[in-house]
Image (cartoon, rainbow, N blue to C red):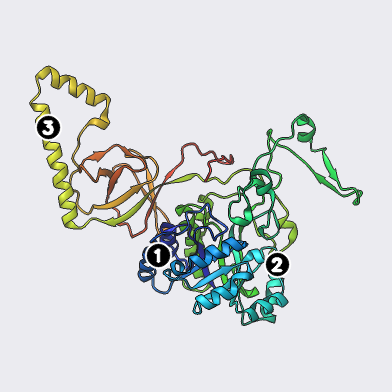
Amino acid sequence: MELLSPAGNVEKLSYAYAYGADAAYIGLKKFSLRVKADNFYEDEYKKVIALKEQFPGKRLHCALNIIFHDDEIDLLKANLDYFKQYPIDAFIVQDIGIVKLLQKEFPDVQLHLSTQASCVNSESVKMYRDMGFSRIVLGREISLNQIKRIKDAVPEMELETFCHGAMCIAYAGRCLMSAYLTGRSAQSGFCSHTCRWNFKLEGAKELVQSGKLLLEEEERKGEYYPVFEGDDFTAILSSKDLCMIDYLKEMKDAGVDSLKIEGRMKSVYYVAMVTRSYRKALDALEGKITQKEAEPYIAELENVSHRESTTGFYFNKAEADKTTSGASDSKYYLAAQIGKAYSEDEFEKLYQTGASNYKKFKDDLDSMHPDAKKARLKDLEIHTDRNVVAFEKKDGWKLYECTALNKIEADTEIEFVSSDFVSLTAKKGEWELISSETGNKLNWVCDNHPCVIYTKYDLPPFTLLRVLDPEYEEGKIRDTGR
């Protein structure tokens, strides 16, 4: 089975490939149902071409899955030359009105039917096959038994289904709630995830919290829908997150050709960690590694922001009907992305810069009047960040490029994760933060602070640095926005 991962921008695309995806799906500005994702524009096609050369054999799918109005088709036509610069292997399409246009302009690019088209039966699959589609991204409301029936009826068609990520409370995601409450249409890619908001029923708190409040539809006497509110607010329409990592064999046996991970709006950390977990689980299923070897990677799914999990509609509809409350949460936050190791020349240059800056700092101190020097040293005891400390050469240690994304403090414990190992804990004294400009040691860094990391550990490309979130509480879901 193919593993298909989300990529909201070039950076996420690189991590999807590096952490084991066989293919990744992207969106192009204005034509994707995830317009709030960064998506791809301007000259980023050059970076995408370079990535496909760096990761030979990896595929690129492009989502053109909005419902097109005439003015949007005009805009699509105007951008065709731009699209042709991308090394696209397949278009993901919902609106059949653009099919002939794509077939004419991109004769060598496959057509995949979007899940938004709600294809859930073999007769529809045959119709789309005859139109020129090579793959169907089945509607999420389908069971494994139904998938097997479709595969048996149309074995030549590739079937793609979601295996992980957020679910939608509306059928096939065709929801009007966001447009109604915020003016942001889900069908144009502006969904505000209104179904996950917390609502409060004013004036009836005790009754709502009692669990005695029930809804009864006029023509369905005796059928009750309970309405319950917890601590002041509740998310009455929020679905659980899909997680099928324990049932990949069942999906394969049903005839699934491609496993799709949801999340083009999710973080680099999410893309990397979820892709890695499913890659290892698939490798175990295919006999490339043992199940025991895969288990630690699979367990890491718990360290990625998520809601309660469900198997969706795959086994029974009742499981999909269960809602949940609370936002996604994780005990970790992504602190930095680790780049390439410094060469010997780069290392020596930064080392000499640090030594020179330290010498100047000491010379300036020594040239001060004794009273001024005493006052300066006192100030440095209080404001340690103003001190200048050159880093020392250590046998076996290496310097790595480091892009800080959140605060990292030099006296804490950090963790590295990569596609090559599960996690690696670096304790205080096993790593240092160095300014990439001054060559001096740093006590801490934040987003946009130029730095490198100096450590005794060998770190492969695309390593990530994560830190335990001190505000995380086990069992308590916070609305962190992640």
Q: Is residue 237 above or below residue 383?
A: below
Q: Amino acid at mark 1?
A: Tyr
Decide which of 382, 134 is in the foreground and name it. 134
10 Å crowding of disc 2: few (<14), some (14-19), many (20+): many
Under circle 3, the secondary element is helix
Estimate the x, y position of residue 61 in percent, counting from the top left: 50, 68
Tell me where residue 343 sits by quadrant. bottom left
Q: Amino acid at mark 2?
A: Ser
Check disc 1 and report the residue beneath it: 45
CA separation, marks 1 and 2?
A: 37 Å
* Left or right of residue 284, residue 382 in this image: left
Under circle 1, the secondary element is helix
Estimate the x, y position of residue 311 in percent, counting from the top left: 66, 60
* Left or right of residue 225, residue 109 in this image: left
Which residue sits furthest left?
367
10 Å crowding of disc 1: few (<14), some (14-19), many (20+): some
Residue sitting at x 48%, y 52% = 267
Tell me where residue 386 sits by quadrant. top left
* Left or right of residue 457, residue 241 in this image: right
For residue 166, say whether it is visible.
no
CA separation, marks 1 and 3?
A: 50 Å
Q: Amino acid at mark 3?
A: Lys
Check disc 2 and report the residue beneath it: 143
Check disc 3 and report the residue beneath it: 362
Residue sitting at x 72%, y 77% = 123
Mark closest to the chain's N terminus, 3 or 2: 2
